[in-house]
Image: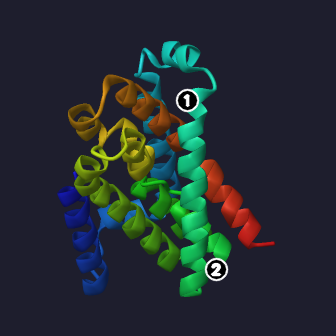
Protein backbone atom coordinates (compact mmCIF):
# COMPACT_ATOMS: atom_id res chain seq x y z
CA UNK A 1 0.00 0.00 0.00
CA UNK A 2 2.87 2.38 0.84
CA UNK A 3 4.55 1.62 -2.51
CA UNK A 4 1.28 2.24 -4.38
CA UNK A 5 0.78 5.54 -2.50
CA UNK A 6 4.31 6.68 -3.36
CA UNK A 7 3.91 5.66 -7.00
CA UNK A 8 0.62 7.59 -7.15
CA UNK A 9 2.32 10.62 -5.63
CA UNK A 10 5.21 10.57 -8.12
CA UNK A 11 2.83 9.96 -11.03
CA UNK A 12 0.80 12.98 -9.91
CA UNK A 13 3.97 15.07 -9.65
CA UNK A 14 4.98 14.03 -13.14
CA UNK A 15 1.53 14.97 -14.50
CA UNK A 16 1.64 18.34 -12.76
CA UNK A 17 5.19 19.20 -13.84
CA UNK A 18 4.57 18.01 -17.40
CA UNK A 19 1.38 20.03 -17.67
CA UNK A 20 -0.51 16.89 -18.64
CA UNK A 21 -4.22 17.59 -18.90
CA UNK A 22 -7.00 15.20 -19.77
CA UNK A 23 -10.71 14.85 -18.93
CA UNK A 24 -10.08 12.42 -16.03
CA UNK A 25 -7.57 14.74 -14.32
CA UNK A 26 -9.84 17.73 -14.88
CA UNK A 27 -12.77 15.84 -13.35
CA UNK A 28 -10.73 14.77 -10.29
CA UNK A 29 -9.43 18.29 -9.70
CA UNK A 30 -12.89 19.78 -10.05
CA UNK A 31 -14.45 17.27 -7.62
CA UNK A 32 -11.93 17.14 -4.73
CA UNK A 33 -14.72 17.67 -2.21
CA UNK A 34 -16.65 14.70 -3.61
CA UNK A 35 -13.54 12.52 -3.23
CA UNK A 36 -13.24 13.70 0.37
CA UNK A 37 -16.88 12.74 1.09
CA UNK A 38 -16.30 9.29 -0.44
CA UNK A 39 -13.27 8.86 1.86
CA UNK A 40 -15.35 9.82 4.91
CA UNK A 41 -18.12 7.43 3.85
CA UNK A 42 -15.59 4.61 3.44
CA UNK A 43 -14.11 5.15 6.91
CA UNK A 44 -17.64 5.03 8.33
CA UNK A 45 -18.14 1.66 6.63
CA UNK A 46 -14.75 0.49 7.94
CA UNK A 47 -15.67 1.37 11.53
CA UNK A 48 -19.13 -0.15 11.16
CA UNK A 49 -17.70 -3.46 9.91
CA UNK A 50 -16.00 -4.08 13.27
CA UNK A 51 -18.92 -6.07 14.68
CA UNK A 52 -17.33 -6.54 18.11
CA UNK A 53 -16.64 -2.82 18.52
CA UNK A 54 -19.58 -2.01 20.81
CA UNK A 55 -18.95 -5.10 22.93
CA UNK A 56 -15.31 -4.11 23.33
CA UNK A 57 -16.30 -0.56 24.32
CA UNK A 58 -18.57 -1.94 27.05
CA UNK A 59 -15.81 -4.28 28.23
CA UNK A 60 -13.02 -1.70 28.52
CA UNK A 61 -15.15 1.34 29.53
CA UNK A 62 -13.11 4.54 29.96
CA UNK A 63 -9.82 2.69 29.43
CA UNK A 64 -10.32 2.66 25.66
CA UNK A 65 -10.15 6.46 25.50
CA UNK A 66 -6.83 6.82 27.32
CA UNK A 67 -4.67 5.67 24.39
CA UNK A 68 -6.47 7.73 21.68
CA UNK A 69 -6.34 10.83 23.93
CA UNK A 70 -2.59 10.29 24.36
CA UNK A 71 -2.10 9.72 20.61
CA UNK A 72 -4.08 12.85 19.73
CA UNK A 73 -2.42 15.05 22.38
CA UNK A 74 1.09 13.85 21.46
CA UNK A 75 0.47 14.32 17.74
CA UNK A 76 -0.93 17.83 18.17
CA UNK A 77 1.91 18.91 20.49
CA UNK A 78 4.52 17.44 18.13
CA UNK A 79 2.91 19.12 15.12
CA UNK A 80 2.69 22.46 16.93
CA UNK A 81 6.36 22.25 17.91
CA UNK A 82 7.41 21.36 14.35
CA UNK A 83 5.26 24.20 13.00
CA UNK A 84 7.00 26.59 15.39
CA UNK A 85 10.48 25.35 14.47
CA UNK A 86 9.86 25.47 10.70
CA UNK A 87 7.98 28.77 10.65
CA UNK A 88 4.84 27.05 9.36
CA UNK A 89 2.81 28.30 12.33
CA UNK A 90 1.79 26.53 15.52
CA UNK A 91 -1.81 25.82 14.50
CA UNK A 92 -0.91 24.98 10.89
CA UNK A 93 1.65 22.49 12.21
CA UNK A 94 -0.96 21.02 14.55
CA UNK A 95 -3.47 20.81 11.68
CA UNK A 96 -0.94 18.88 9.57
CA UNK A 97 -0.25 16.47 12.45
CA UNK A 98 -4.03 16.10 13.01
CA UNK A 99 -4.06 13.58 10.17
CA UNK A 100 -2.78 11.05 12.75
CA UNK A 101 -1.35 8.99 9.89
CA UNK A 102 -4.41 9.22 7.61
CA UNK A 103 -2.51 10.80 4.74
CA UNK A 104 -5.21 10.77 2.04
CA UNK A 105 -7.80 12.67 4.07
CA UNK A 106 -5.29 15.07 5.64
CA UNK A 107 -3.75 15.97 2.30
CA UNK A 108 -7.01 16.71 0.50
CA UNK A 109 -8.61 18.54 3.44
CA UNK A 110 -5.66 20.82 4.13
CA UNK A 111 -5.16 21.54 0.45
CA UNK A 112 -8.74 22.82 0.37
CA UNK A 113 -8.46 24.74 3.65
CA UNK A 114 -4.93 26.17 3.67
CA UNK A 115 -3.37 25.57 0.27
CA UNK A 116 -1.37 23.19 -1.88
CA UNK A 117 1.82 23.49 0.18
CA UNK A 118 0.10 22.56 3.46
CA UNK A 119 -1.80 19.75 1.72
CA UNK A 120 1.41 18.32 0.29
CA UNK A 121 3.20 18.52 3.65
CA UNK A 122 0.22 16.87 5.37
CA UNK A 123 0.15 14.08 2.80
CA UNK A 124 3.88 13.38 3.02
CA UNK A 125 4.23 13.70 6.81
CA UNK A 126 1.27 11.41 7.50
CA UNK A 127 2.46 8.95 4.86
CA UNK A 128 5.88 8.95 6.53
CA UNK A 129 4.22 8.28 9.90
CA UNK A 130 2.58 5.17 8.49
CA UNK A 131 5.79 4.11 6.77
CA UNK A 132 7.89 4.56 9.92
CA UNK A 133 5.27 2.60 11.88
CA UNK A 134 5.93 -0.46 9.72
CA UNK A 135 9.60 -0.37 10.69
CA UNK A 136 9.20 0.71 14.33
CA UNK A 137 6.40 -1.58 15.55
CA UNK A 138 8.60 -4.73 15.65
CA UNK A 139 11.14 -2.80 17.75
CA UNK A 140 8.62 -0.96 19.94
CA UNK A 141 6.80 -4.22 20.73
CA UNK A 142 9.86 -5.30 22.74
CA UNK A 143 9.55 -2.24 24.96
CA UNK A 144 5.81 -1.56 25.26
CA UNK A 145 2.84 -2.80 23.25
CA UNK A 146 0.89 0.42 23.74
CA UNK A 147 3.74 2.37 22.14
CA UNK A 148 3.03 0.40 18.94
CA UNK A 149 -0.52 1.76 18.92
CA UNK A 150 0.73 5.31 19.50
CA UNK A 151 3.18 5.09 16.60
CA UNK A 152 0.48 3.81 14.22
CA UNK A 153 -2.11 6.47 15.11
CA UNK A 154 -5.26 6.23 13.01
CA UNK A 155 -3.77 3.40 10.92
CA UNK A 156 -3.80 1.02 13.89
CA UNK A 157 -7.19 -0.35 12.78
CA UNK A 158 -6.24 -1.11 9.18
CA UNK A 159 -2.86 -0.98 7.44
CA UNK A 160 -0.66 -1.52 10.53
CA UNK A 161 -3.08 -3.99 12.18
CA UNK A 162 -1.35 -7.09 10.71
CA UNK A 163 1.86 -5.98 12.46
CA UNK A 164 -0.06 -5.55 15.71
CA UNK A 165 -1.43 -9.07 15.37
CA UNK A 166 2.04 -10.46 14.73
CA UNK A 167 4.04 -8.59 17.38
CA UNK A 168 1.61 -7.80 20.21
CA UNK A 169 -1.05 -9.46 22.36
CA UNK A 170 -4.75 -10.08 21.70
CA UNK A 171 -5.74 -7.30 24.13
CA UNK A 172 -3.42 -4.87 22.35
CA UNK A 173 -4.99 -5.79 19.01
CA UNK A 174 -8.49 -5.01 20.36
CA UNK A 175 -7.29 -1.68 21.77
CA UNK A 176 -5.52 -1.04 18.47
CA UNK A 177 -8.76 -1.41 16.50
CA UNK A 178 -10.62 0.82 18.96
CA UNK A 179 -7.84 3.43 18.86
CA UNK A 180 -7.86 3.48 15.06
CA UNK A 181 -11.64 3.86 14.93
CA UNK A 182 -11.66 6.72 17.46
CA UNK A 183 -8.68 8.52 15.91
CA UNK A 184 -10.13 8.19 12.40
CA UNK A 185 -13.41 9.69 13.59
CA UNK A 186 -11.58 12.64 15.17
CA UNK A 187 -9.27 13.46 12.24
CA UNK A 188 -11.72 15.76 10.35
CA UNK A 189 -12.77 17.43 13.62
CA UNK A 190 -9.18 18.09 14.69
CA UNK A 191 -8.14 19.44 11.28
CA UNK A 192 -11.12 21.82 11.20
CA UNK A 193 -10.51 22.91 14.80
CA UNK A 194 -6.81 23.63 14.23
CA UNK A 195 -7.62 25.46 11.00
CA UNK A 196 -10.22 27.56 12.82
CA UNK A 197 -7.72 28.46 15.55
CA UNK A 198 -5.06 29.40 12.98
CA UNK A 199 -7.43 31.96 11.48
CA UNK A 200 -8.09 33.69 14.82
Q: Residue furthest right?
A: 200
Q: Residue at x 63, y 53 (%)?
A: 190
- Numbered disc 2: secondary structure: loop
Side of 194 where 116 appears, left or right: left
| Residue 186 in view here | no
Give the labeled residue for mark 2.
89
Q: Is residue 69 above or below residue 91?
A: above
Relative image position of residue 44 (x, y in whole percent): 49, 32
Relative image position of residue 150 (x, y in whole percent): 44, 48
Camera-nearest label, 2 or 1: 1
Q: Is residue 81 above or below residue 173?
A: below
Side of 23 where 7 appears, left or right: left
Q: Residue at x 28, y 49 (%)?
A: 137
Q: Nearer the viewer, residue 178 or 10?
A: 178
Side of 112 where 144 appears, left or right: left
Q: Residue at x 54, y 36 (%)?
A: 182
Q: Residue furthest front?
A: 143
Side of 169 where 77 appears, left or right: right
* Spatial separation of the CA atoms under disc 2 and disc 1: 32 Å
Q: Quadrant of the C terminus?
A: bottom right
Q: Nearer the viewer, residue 99 or 164?
A: 164
Give the labeled residue for mark 1.
64
Q: Nearer the viewer, residue 153 or 27?
A: 153
- The answer to which quarter of the image holds residue 75 is bottom right
Relative image position of residue 68 (x, y in whole percent): 55, 41
Q: Please rate how many residues cluster around mark 1, counting C-alpha atoms within 10 Å: few if below 14, some from 14 to 19, many from 20.
A: some
- The answer to which quarter of the image holds residue 49 is top left
Q: Residue at x 38, y 49 (%)?
A: 152
Q: Are marks 2 and 1 in contact (CB under 8 Å)?
A: no
- Numbered disc 1: secondary structure: helix
Amino acid sequence: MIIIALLALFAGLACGIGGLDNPLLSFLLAHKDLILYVLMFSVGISIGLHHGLLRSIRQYHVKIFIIPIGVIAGSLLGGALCGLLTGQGVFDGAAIASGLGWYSLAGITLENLIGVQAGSIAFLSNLMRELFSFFSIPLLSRLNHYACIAAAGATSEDTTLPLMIKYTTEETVILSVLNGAICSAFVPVLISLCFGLSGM
